[in-house]
Amino acid sequence: MPVKNKVQLITYPDSMGGNLANLDAILGECFPGLFEGGIHVLPPYPSSGDRGFAPLTYSEIDPAFGGWEDLRRLGKRYDIILDLMVNHVSKQSPWFRDFLEKGRESDWADLFLTLDKVWPGAVPDEGDIARMFLRRPRPYSVFRVAADGREEKLWTTFGKQDPSEQVDMDWRSPLFRRLITEFFGNFRDNGVKIVRLDAVGYLVKKPGTSCFFVEPEIFEFMAWIADMAGSLGIELLPEVHAPRAIQYRLSGKGYWIYDFILPYAVLDSIFNATARRLKAYLSDRPSRQFTMLDCHDGVPVKPDMEGLYRPEDAQALVRTCLERGGNLSLVHSPGHKDPDGFDVHQVRGSYYSLLDRNDDAYLAARAMQFFVPGVPQVYYVGLLAGEHDVEAVARTGEGREINRHNYGMDEIREAAGKDVVKRLVRLIQFRNSHPAFDGTFRLSDVPDHAIELEWSGSGERCLLSVDLLTMKSRIQTVSRDGTVGEFAV
């Protein structure tokens, strides 16, 4: 089933009303029929950490969120997108618990990446580690096996604790392929249409490389999983944070990719009242992408924007975001910082707040996103024009909680009544319904303080014009019979 060229929603299973049943109800009440492209439900599985991204299993829905029947009910109205953390599972998963109990005698031992599979004697090569874009101070954790008290070093790409909650799997193991195939079969049985391959770029570990998006092995894996998923009628969305050359190689082989450049580029255009850099980017960009402005993590900077910014420009953008209450995640690896020490991985915060809660600027940003070629996704906080949740950051000590507010039903009803949200809903409806978006895209040649994006198809035309000096946006339409329409965004 092809991906629909319509707007999608991204939400946690408990962020809009507390569970999947309430999510279904509140969308039907406040935003009926709005997300024709589908709903990306962030991990609803039992998990031991990282807000769902350390899954114990994919065969169950966490009872706090509901059950598979709730997801199937939601799937009757929306295409459902789910995550598969293809790189890792929880250390509390049944497979790793068995390994911790029995060690190398476990039936599941080969599923995991012990360091001796990569380096002789399980002794890490410091030169190899220096090449890596580390997500934690070191890429492995030490675990103790109950059976004989032996210490085992296992690859753990992610996680703040030591030992990590998230243990990497060995993609070459037959056990890995067996499990992944079972997971996809369960997705198919429950009506899942798209699976996002979370952290897929970290899957292959190979001595002498950065252990990120290692070629040609990563494409060997992608070919296998795409063939298997396709046989079940499931589309794949690889999630890869990397310089655009890597993303474009993935796109060049026919896979969907994420546009992780657009969020920064749109902020840059609005902050500096010039679309020069944004237009240069849009003039040479694959169209088979999912677009976003906000998400559960942050606005990507390094490595996604490498080669696309001047250090002084990036530092100025980050300063503005900090002045407006955002916070940062930073790069661990010294070799992946800029020569001047610039080390921002992502800027975290509500996109609405980063735009200084300016309704016109926010709607201009969304309009640009919706007119850029690709499948647009809107994060639930962005849908509700939510602001920084600084209390959640203070309460949890987790900087990403600034943009992960959990809304009660009454909060959602109140937010749905705000003028900025009503304008956004109207814009989403336009993006979903106008036939020109299935046609041809054109980037107009206009002064850099403005941007014009045009679509034409099925005898219809629509043109977005944004003035970055005034932050006023308008859409002009021309129908088959020549009738001209216009409305302010």
Image (spheres, rainbow, N blue to C red):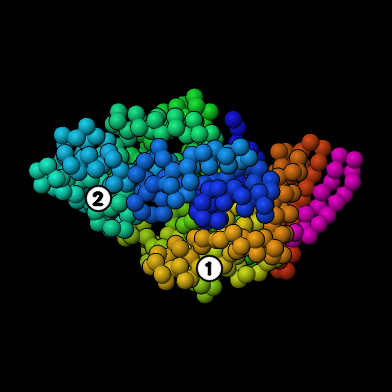
Q: Nearer the viewer, mark 1 or mark 2?
A: 1
Query: At label 1, which amino acid type do we have?
Result: His
Residue drawn at the location 16% of the way across and 39% of the way down:
102
User: Closer to the camera, 20 or 116?
Assistant: 20
Tell me how far mark 1 sits from mark 2, CA to CA: 33 Å
Give the vertical position of 362 relative to 203 (above or below).
below
Q: Dot 1, how many residues are within 10 Å of its Cα: few (below 14), some (14-19), or many (20+)?
A: many
Residue for badge 1? 388
Q: Is residue 309 magenta?
A: no
* Residue occupying the point 21% across, 40% down: 99
Of 403 and 451, nearer the camera is 403
Quadrant occupied by the N terminus: top right
Q: Position of residue 25 (x, y in %)?
A: 61, 50
Q: Which residue is mark 2?
A: 140
- Residue drawn 28% across and 47% down? 91
User: What is the three-letter code of the residue carrying label 2?
Assistant: Tyr
Q: Magenta region, mostly helix, strand or loop? A: strand
**Nearer-the-camera pick, 87 or 93:** 93
| Residue 213 percent coordinates (x, y) | 38, 42
Q: Report if residue 485 lies within the magenta region.
A: yes
- Residue 191 in the image, given as x and y percentages of width and height: 53, 34
Left or right: residue 435 compared with residue 131: right
Q: Which residues are magenta?
A: 473-489
Decide: is 2 above or below 475: above
